[in-house]
Each structure stands twice: as structure tokens, then as C-alpha cells.
Image (cartoon, rainbow, N blue to C red):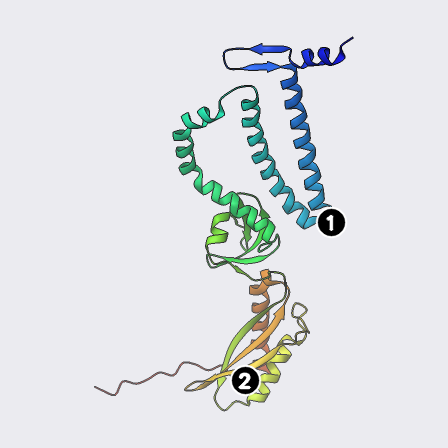
Amino acid sequence: MDWSGIIKRFFEYELYTSKSISITVGTLLFIAFTLMITKVGLRLLKQAFTKRASPEVAGRLEAVFNFVNYFVYLIMFFFVLNTIGINVSMFLTTSAALFVGLGFALQDIFRDLIAGIYILVDKTLNVGDVIEVEGKMAVVHTINLRCTIVETRNRQSIVIPNRKMIDNLVNNWTHEEPVIRSKVEVGVYIGTDAAMVKEVLLNCVKDNADILKDPAPMVFLDSFGESSIRFILYYFIDKAFDNDRIASDVRYEIDRQFKVNNIALPVPVLKLDNTK
């Protein structure tokens, strides 16, 4: 029995045929085998990249590989069409105008997708980072392929296209380091004991649980005015999103301790116009 001839006829058995399309058993098996190899290959590639990655990085790569899967299967779709005899080049040529129109219409979306992949891989932005958006402090809630969702202190969610996160200057307060330096400025009358003011200001943050002991707070004598001396109290916190509340607590304590130590805040000096 000629097994090779039987197998050859089995693979060449035509299931469907027309003027330009020919589908045989061998064609279907080849397509199924190719799709299976592609699926297994993508899965192994994904496991190779995510196996040793941290959960956060693995989540980022998951989104990237989802996009890669769509792209690879799109190529496979055209490959299958070409395998069964459909002229893919003719299809692409006749659809060129449509693709150009869609390209212009979807260019911003594609830019968002590419920017999303860049953000996910480059790690310039992470979930939980505190950033400044249009003058507002916000914490990054979700990073998707197309957009990034942040939440402001007013619990307002803002959806930002990823291309804007790449094109615009974004102030990331906590990138790779949750500790930030904050400050409170205060002035006192000229003639006030500067050493005492420094000691009082440091005492104002000494017992504040939100302010770090290391790095230690510090006081700078910033400038001399016509009737006042200006000091800057610098302190470090690891809760950048709560900076406004912490700064307010510090100011309340400064006001209290200044009154206890008879340190007066200066008032503006009125200038008289003697030209008349």
C-alpha cells in the first residue's frame, strides 16, 4: 500500500475551490498548525519576560503583550488570506484610501497607544505616583494603554490621553522616591531674635507625626525686608498627596507658638506720597 500517495491525496483533497481560491485539507491543517505555533510562541515569549518580573512590572508587560497579540494576529489574518489564494496586495491597494482616512482619524489614538506602551515599559510613571496636572495635585490611579486616570484631592477623576503625558512637562513628585521636601515661609519684625525664631520653628515640627525626623527639618533665614525678616522652614514628608494638610497643621502650630513666645508677625509698611 502506497501510504505516501494516500497521505498526499488526503492533504491535497479540495474542500472548496473557485476561480482564485483553493482550500484543501492541507491548507486548513497548515493554518491551524501556524495559529497554534503562534499562540504557543506568544505565550512562551510572554512567560519569559514576566517570569522574573515583579507583580507591578508583570502587570505592565501584560498590557504590552495584549497589544502585541492584536498586531501579530492581524498579520496572521492577512497571511491566512494569502494562503487560501486571496490577493492581499490587491486588497490593501484598493483599501489604501480607506486606511489613509482611518489613519488620519485615528492618529491621536495610535499616538496614545504608543505613548501608553512607552509609559508602561519605561516606568516614568507608576500607579500611586503624585503628579501635578494643570496646577492640581493628583495621584495616579490607573495606567491604561490609551489613557492614564488620576484622582485629585477633591476626589475628581481626570482622564488624560497618554500622548499628553509624553508631550507635556509632567511634574512627578514621587518618581522612584516617596520622600519630598516641603516648606512654610514666615516673616517676623526686624529686631526679633533670629536664633529664637529658628528654635521655635523647629519646635513647631518636632512632634508632628507626619514630618520625618530623617532628613531633619531645617530653617533658613531667607531675606531682610524694610520692616521684617523672612524665614523658610523646610521639612520632609513621605505623603506628598497630603502636603496641603500637613502644611496647614504646621502653620497652625507656628501661629500658636509665636503667640506663646511673643513673636509678632509683621504688617505691611504704608508709604506716604510726599510729592504733592
Is 225 above or below relative to 116?
A: below
In which quarter of the view is residue 102 placed? top left
Camera-nearest label, 2 or 1: 1
In which quarter of the view is residue 226 placed? bottom left
Is 215 above or below relative to 193?
A: above
Q: Earlier in the sequence, mark 2 or mark 1?
A: 1
Residue 118 at what x, y percent from top left? 55, 49
Q: Residue at 63%, 23% (x, y): give it.
A: 31
The extreme front residue here reads: 2
Residue type pointed to by label 1: Arg
Quadrant for the C terminus in the image: bottom left
Decide if residue 2 is on the left or right side of residue 224: right
The extreme right residue here reads: 1
Residue 98 at what x, y percent from top left? 40, 29
Can see residue 155? no
Residue 142 at what x, y percent from top left? 59, 47
Give the camera-side residue of 174 and 115: 115
How crowded pointer 2 is (Cα within 10 Å; few <14, some 14-19, many 20+) is rated as some
Residue type pointed to by label 2: Ile
How far apart are the two marked residues, 2 and 1, measured between alpha carbons?
59 Å
Give the camera-side residue of 145 and 19: 19
The extreme left residue here reads: 276
How crowded pointer 1 is (Cα within 10 Å; few <14, some 14-19, many 20+) is rated as few
Residue 275 at what x, y percent from top left? 23, 87
Q: Which residue is mark 2?
A: 263
Q: Residue at 50%, 15% (x, y): give it.
A: 20
Disc number at residue 188? none
Give the camera-side residue of 192 and 239: 239
Q: Secondary structure at mark 1?
A: loop
Q: Residue at 48%, 48% (x, y): give it.
A: 163
Q: Which residue is mark 1?
A: 52
